[in-house]
Image (cartoon, rainbow, N blue to C red):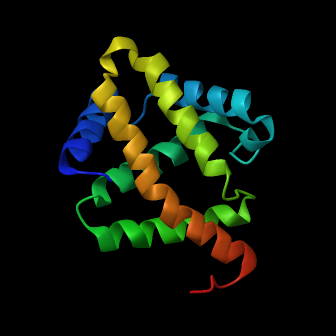
Amino acid sequence: MLNPSHIRLVRDTWAAIGSEDDVLCFLFLEEVSRREPMLRWRFHPDQGLAGAAVFRAMDEVLRALDSESELLAFLEKTGQAHAYHGFWRGDLTTLAQAWVAALQTRLGPELTKARQVAWTQLWQTVSGPLEKALFAKARGPVPV
């Protein structure tokens, strides 16, 4: 479960990186390609535009962490939009692993174990609502 300490750690890490880090963007997209080559093609072919979209989404997630309703609304909208691009439920695990690996490469020893755990918890927190939205858009309403 994402706790206040995790939130502080991911926000501090993000602030230290900067939300327009071309190196992190490149590393993330390379990790995605290495882990699941077909998944890379679901991103914009222009690396700069793909990275800008990823970073805008991460900015929004980190901003919305203080309001569960805002976070859930953003994740639902994002999940539904990504269903149109061919993203599917299992893709989020690959994206999460690629993101943490890219952070490890980019930050080296600055990505402490606590920061790594915090980013992993963030991905676990957002994956459920994103997967629900992806599945609902792809298959229709999710049975309750």
Q: How many marks?
A: 0
Residue depicted at x 38% and y 45%: 121
Relative side of 109 to 124, left or right = left
Closer to us: 128 or 49: 128
Instruction: Tell me: 100 left or right of 87.
Output: left
In the picture, which quadrant includes the C terminus?
Answer: bottom right
Position of 54 compared to 91: left or right?
left
Q: Is residue 80 visible?
A: no
Could you tell me which residue is drawn at 48 percent across and 17 percent down?
A: 105
Place residue 47 in its image quadrant: top right
Of all residues, the one furthest to the top in this rendering is: 109
- Residue 103: x and y in percent read 45, 26
Residue 46 position in % (x across, y down): 68, 37
Of residues 28 and 136, the one nearer the viewer is: 136
List x then y, in percent, for residue 26. 58, 26
Image position, residue 44 (x, y; %): 69, 45
Q: On screen, 53 above or below 141? A: above
Left or right of 72 in this view: 139? right
Q: Is 85 located above or below residue 53 in the figure?
A: below
Q: Nearer the viewer, residue 14 or 130?
A: 130
Q: Which residue does the image show at 45% across and 48% down from the upper left?
A: 123
Give the residue at x 46% y 43%: 55
Q: Above or below — where is 84 with respect to 49? A: below
